Amino acid sequence: MTGNARKHELGDRAETVFAQYLTDQGKWLHSADRAEAERFVDFLQQFDRPEEAPERRRKNGRMIAAAAAILLAMGGVASWMLRPAAPALASYATGHAERRAIRLDDGSVIELAAESKVDVRYSARQREIFLRSGEALFTATHDSARPFSVVAAHGRIVDIGTRFDVRVGKDEAQVTVVEGQVRVGVSHAAQPEGDGIFRDLRRGQRVNFGVRRDRGVAIAYMGETQQVDAENALAWTRGKLFFDGEPLERAIAIVNSYAADQLVLKESKLRNMPVFGVLDQSDVQGLLSLVNDPQAIEVHRRADASANHR
């Protein structure tokens, strides 16, 4: 905006867009939305600051009041800026063969699969969940003034009123939308600001994203959007494992997080072989039956499992 104020072009999305812009989530906005938010901020910055011009404090008071009115008209952006400070970072984790449900103070729920860990950071401006390992199902209570987002594998998944499952590996994550809609964005510190990849997903859609390293350079990527049965993403919450092309190495790691016997892949050349099928979470033999060359996998007894049966 220039000298004269004009109506913003964000329409009904103004509240959500401006709320994200005021936080570090601004980098995940579409370039057109971010540009419009920046024009609005430029307009507000036309107002003189009392500390910079003491002789104009009376005039500035009226202008600040006008600016506050504009913010309030955008759906309460100013109100959440005045909320009390957020609690410290909270961590939750599950052990071997354990599942756990965590209800957060805003009513959102995180269901953790076995051997998974999340860190939760709620502030007055945003709700951030960091999925450090494993898999989790998120049921988010929508609050457009305080976005709910999950950070995993250099990517960020922003809730647009939804329920979604996220599985994370070393440098890659997979998100499946069970209900509603999310916006997925991925970038990396080595890339210039604004060069990230963004995509909106709806119920029954899945995408893999993360960072690949090419000759020492980290490059963010996002795979093709897949149409899947959303209910299959919830199989683990019912004691089942559903594999729809996951690499064998990843499938073994998932089964190992539940089973007493542990699988070890002997043939590294098979680590990316896709696995398809449904089995019980602790069914080691079931996974072996899905592999064309079961001799390529060894079965070991967990040391702690042996101790527990003494």
Image: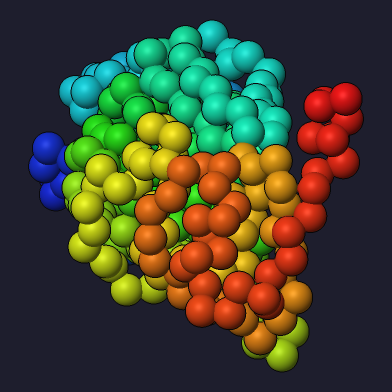
Residue 144, placed above or below residue 2: above
Decide if residue 259 is on the left or right side of residue 233.
right
Image point 55% across, 27% down: which residue? 99
Residue 47: quadrant of the picture = top left
Residue 292 vertical placement versus 121 (above, below) = below
Give the quarter of the figure containing the C terminus.
top right
Q: Nearer the viewer, residue 51 or 135?
A: 135
Residue under the point 56% across and 69% down: 248
Work out which residue is located at the far front of the displayed protein and give it: 310
In the image, residue 266 above or below residue 89: below
The single residue placed furthest to the bottom in the displayed view is 215
Q: Residue at x 62, y 40 (%)?
A: 258
Q: How many marks?
A: 0
Q: Quadrant of residue 107?
A: top left
Rendering quarter of residue 198: bottom left
Would you say 133 lies left or right of 7 here?
right
Above or below for 57 versus 139: above
Q: Nearer the viewer, residue 167 or 147?
A: 167
Q: Residue at x 37, y 41 (%)?
A: 235
User: Where residue 179 sits in the image (x, y, percent)?
Assistant: 22, 38
Give percent across and percent down for residue 21.
40, 43
